[in-house]
Amino acid sequence: MQFLKSFYIHNTFFKYLAILSACFIVSFWFKNLYPIAWILILVLVGLFLFDVFLLYATGKGMVANRVLPKKFSNSDMNPVLIRFKTEYPFKTITSIIDELPEQFQKRDFNYITSAIKGESREFEYSVRPVDRGEYIFGNLNIYASSPLRIVKRRFTFQKDQMVPVYPSIIQMQQYDFLAINNRLSQIGLKKIRRIGHTQEFEQIKEYVQGDDIRTLNWKATAKQNQLMVNQYQDEKSQPVYSIIDTGRVMKMPFNGLKLLDYAINSALAFSNVALKRNEKTGLIGFSKQIETYVPAVQKITHLNTILEKLYNIDTEFTDSDFGMLYGHVKRKVNQRSLLLLYTNFEHISSLKRQLPYLLALAKKHVLVVIFFENSELETLIATDAENIQAIYHKTIAEKFSLEKKLMQKELQKYGIQTILTKPGQLTINTINKYLEIKARGLL
């Protein structure tokens, strides 16, 4: 039974049969070819049996394993390493088929190579998940054949290997590395150091041209016999909350990724940056009710708690209750905080329904409303219209695009900070806004 499960006919065998069939057909006109065709049939049968012997005489002909990371990073290219080794005493032609998780919907994976006895080989391929959750790999199949290529023997390894897909850890590490090395400007981030009238004293230093004379320290000046000034830095240890709307408006996909997942990836990267800057960082997820609540804490290990909570967030098919959100924030968040609200508004009427609650939140806290440009509409607007129908579609797209800008103006009119961004630029724009707010001393 095990033999039958591992036994396969090589495609080349059918080519041999086709040649033999042609010989029999041609022998209808050339009689001398008929016995030769039968001799070739016997040769093929002999080679068939010999090839079976070659492949099955060695009990453990192939050894292989799939090396997976502990976690996949959502929306990023994640490497998968395949290692294999042949124990056959001849050159082996291998066809490797890895059964990828059903979420990828890829059924044409096939890597063909060759190896000699005792040779260890490896290759790497990448996968890009677009949903969080558990991804289960099936069998790692290796089909080995001899140089005769008449039959194949299948070896299977590592069935049902599971990897969880978490929010974009790679993106988080990218911004973390650049922040540590003071290279934020290389990816479009504004690294702003505000010297002057902030609340937290940093040091006393010598006066240089351009320093604010209002910060002169006269006692230090008299002691050092030269002008000395106080230097201040942005206040630290302030509460910062990422608030994620998990309602139906966040189900809209762009480039295969839901708006919710863009928001989750951004919240993780931003939380990491904020914690590195000694802020207290928290998380709220809501729709009809509060789905997730993580109080703001200033511990670098707190990032693991936020990561686990973000892993389990999912969208609902209902409209979100901003009134309930306001009530929760009023009860739980007593200190003035920075609230980054990830949501989306497609019509100005939907914004006006929620505006009283947004104004109530902004009255006590620094509220930043983050919503999304429709990149598909921007592409349509940039396309030349060639007929009446295209003109109609382009006009409607421009109307919706204008509404987004009007919503941004409406919020700014009431003093609410806003970010209107393309989904792909969400993280950069969010961190930029945070740095701007800190630099302006708004928090």
Image (cartoon, rainbow, N blue to C red):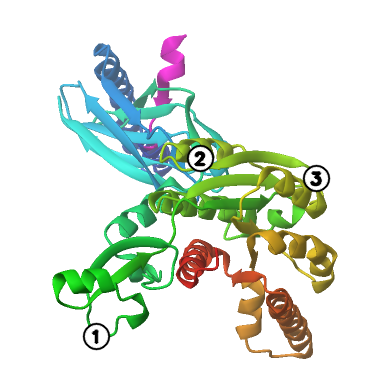
Badge 1: residue crowd in 10 Å (few <14, some 14–19, many ≥20): few
Which element is circle 1 on?
loop
Q: Position of residue 160 (x, y in %)?
A: 49, 24
Q: Which of pointers 3 and 1 lies earlier in the amino acid sequence?
A: 1
Location of residue 2 in the rendering, given as x and y in whole percent from the top left corner: 43, 11
Magenta stretch?
A: 1-11
At x 76%, y 86%, the residue is: 395
Q: In which image quadrant can residue 209 be found?
A: bottom left
Disc 3 residue crowd, few under 14, some 14–19, many 20+, Cα 10 Å? some
Q: Is 4 colored magenta in this rendering?
A: yes
State the mark number for residue 209: 1
Which residue is labeled 3 in the image? Answer: 288
- The amino acid on which the numbered mark 1 sits, given as a three-letter code, is Gln
- Vertical comparison of 329 with 305: above or below: below
Task: Give the residue at x 27% y 31%.
Answer: 83
Q: Secondary structure at mark 3?
A: loop
Q: Nearer the viewer, residue 278 or 114?
A: 278
Label 2: which residue? Answer: 307
Q: CA distance from mark 3 to mark 1?
A: 56 Å
Which residue is found at the position 34% from the left and 31% from the top? Answer: 67
Question: Spatial distance from mark 2 to mark 1, Cα to Cα?
Answer: 46 Å
